[in-house]
């Protein structure tokens, strides 16, 4: 009886192996070419052979298909999202889970040198079979013919130097230094560094000393459809000892301190944009709508804010006042992560000196750049 069972399983094994070989053609060694419909762009996916089986590094799917890749080491699985579909690869398993079905890739995904390699059979057989209308594989030419993927990566960064023109923002007790000037200097330096180091477009709400109402800043952000919005400011307090860096994201829940900064930054509406009437204008339906849009981005905004805060404090050794939530007009932008950075207190003598120092500004700029870089890297892989 025992022997019979063994023979039974052996037969099953032989049948399944031969079926697999019958269905799955030999896998391409070298590379798989990717051709995009209606585009001159092409890509090439390198293949790797381990123990006679052909694999591709899962990260190559990001390059070729703008796939979002989540490597879940705790559950030993890799989740790949592309073309509005989610593919789940299981460690040491030849099965691909494409809910609600399991598909055999013949041999398992493997993990070598901290990289996940998925069987090439996924690309040449299952990918075209599952997404019949979007993907085709030409076995002779080892070509995958696909639709051009949608690119949601961060490409356009908006920087908003606060205040300007008739609105000086915070003014130091010495009356010598104004927020509008410092934040413009920092914004211009940041733009320069981002353009030099990253493949992104950088747009400023103002590049000189001009007055721009708050609603024009949010209009600009929404019209330009940026992928990231960073508003730069300097803080001020009647308490001369107050010092340090803080980063804000938009939310209604807030502390008394956050409310004080919010009142300060929003006061431009009252002082320079027509008082009560203008306030009324800003508090209408458009704000409620943009509030809602921003809520969707809140998680990402908080992620960016945490990175910014940590980097700036580390780089400058300034007091860490933390990431906070407040209801700023200027953060009411739609469909993009948005943060407001308070670079330091102009009302504090020692911080005033630092903020006007070019080398100190460079430190702030480097810290902001590093945070944006790390945020972009994570975002682009996990869109
Ligand atoms: Zn300000």
Image (cartoon, grey):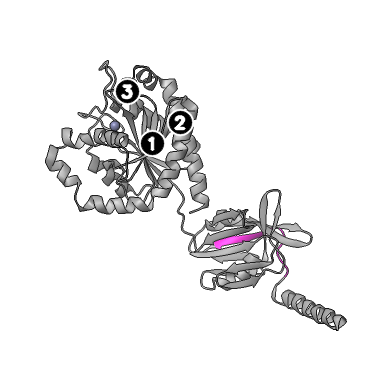
Residue 169, position as x, y percentages in the image: 25, 28
> Is the C-beta separation of discs 2 and 1 under 8 Å?
yes
Mark 2, residue position: 312
Label annotation for residue 247 = 1
Mark 3, residue position: 346
- In the rendered view, would you say 239 is above or below 70? above
Nearest the camera: 142 or 171? 171
Q: Label 1 to label 3, Cα distance in Å?
A: 16 Å
Judged from the image, the secondary structure of the residue bearing numbered disc 3 is loop
Q: Label 3 to label 2, Cα distance in Å?
A: 17 Å
Q: Label 2 to label 1, Cα distance in Å?
A: 10 Å
Look at the numbered disc 3 and say if its residue's Cβ is closer than 8 Å to ligand 1: no
Magenta extent: 26-35
Instruction: Rate crowding at label 1 as few (under 14), some (14 to 19) or many (20 or more) other CA atoms within 10 Å.
Output: many
Counting residues from the start of the chain, the first of labels 1 and 3 encountered is: 1
- In the rendered view, would you say 7 is above or below 248? below
Counting residues from the start of the chain, the first of labels 3 and 2 encountered is: 2
Nearest the camera: 360 or 350? 350
Q: Is residue 20 toward the left or the right of residue 204 in the image?
A: right
């Amino acid at each position: 009886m025992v022997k019979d069972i063994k023979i039974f399983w052996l037969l099953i094994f032989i049948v399944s192996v031969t079926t697999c070989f019958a269905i799955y053609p030999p896998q391409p060694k070298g590379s798989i070419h990717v051709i995009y419909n209606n585009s001159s762009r092409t890509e090439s996916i390198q293949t790797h052979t381990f123990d006679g089986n052909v694999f591709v590094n899962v990260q190559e799917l990001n390059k070729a298909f703008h796939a979002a890749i989540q490597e879940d080491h705790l559950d030993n699985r890799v989740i790949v999202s592309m073309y509005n579909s989610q593919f789940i690869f299981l460690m040491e398993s030849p099965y691909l889970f494409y809910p609600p079905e399991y598909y055999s890739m013949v041999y398992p995904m493997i993990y070598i040198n901290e990289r996940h390699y998925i069987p090439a059979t996924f690309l040449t057989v299952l990918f075209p079979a599952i997404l019949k209308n979007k993907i085709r594989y030409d076995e002779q030419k080892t070509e995958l013919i696909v639709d051009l993927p949608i690119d949601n990566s961060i490409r356009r960064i908006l920087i908003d130097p606060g205040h300007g023109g008739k609105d000086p923002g915070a003014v130091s007790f010495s009356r010598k230094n104004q927020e509008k000037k410092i934040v413009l200097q920092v914004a211009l330096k940041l733009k320069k560094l981002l353009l030099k180091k990253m493949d992104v477009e950088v747009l400023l709400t103002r590049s000189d000393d001009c007055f721009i109402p708050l609603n024009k800043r949010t209009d600009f952000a929404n019209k330009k459809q940026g992928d990231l919005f960073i508003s730069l400011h300097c803080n001020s307090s009647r308490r001369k000892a107050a010092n340090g860096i803080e980063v804000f994201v938009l939310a209604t829940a807030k502390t008394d301190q956050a409310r004080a900064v919010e009142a300060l930054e929003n006061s431009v509406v009252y002082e320079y944009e027509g008082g009560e009437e203008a306030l009324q204008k800003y508090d209408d339906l458009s704000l409620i709508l943009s509030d809602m849009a921003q809520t969707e981005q809140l998680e990402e905004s908080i992620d960016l804010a945490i990175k910014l805060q940590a980097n700036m404090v580390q780089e400058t050794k300034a007091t860490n006042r933390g990431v906070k939530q407040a209801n700023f007009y200027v953060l009411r932008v739609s469909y993009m992560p948005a943060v407001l950075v308070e670079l330091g207190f102009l009302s504090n003598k020692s911080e005033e000196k630092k903020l006007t120092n070019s080398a100190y500004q460079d430190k702030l700029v480097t810290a902001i750049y590093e945070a944006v870089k790390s945020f972009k890297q994570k975002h682009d892989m996990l869109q």
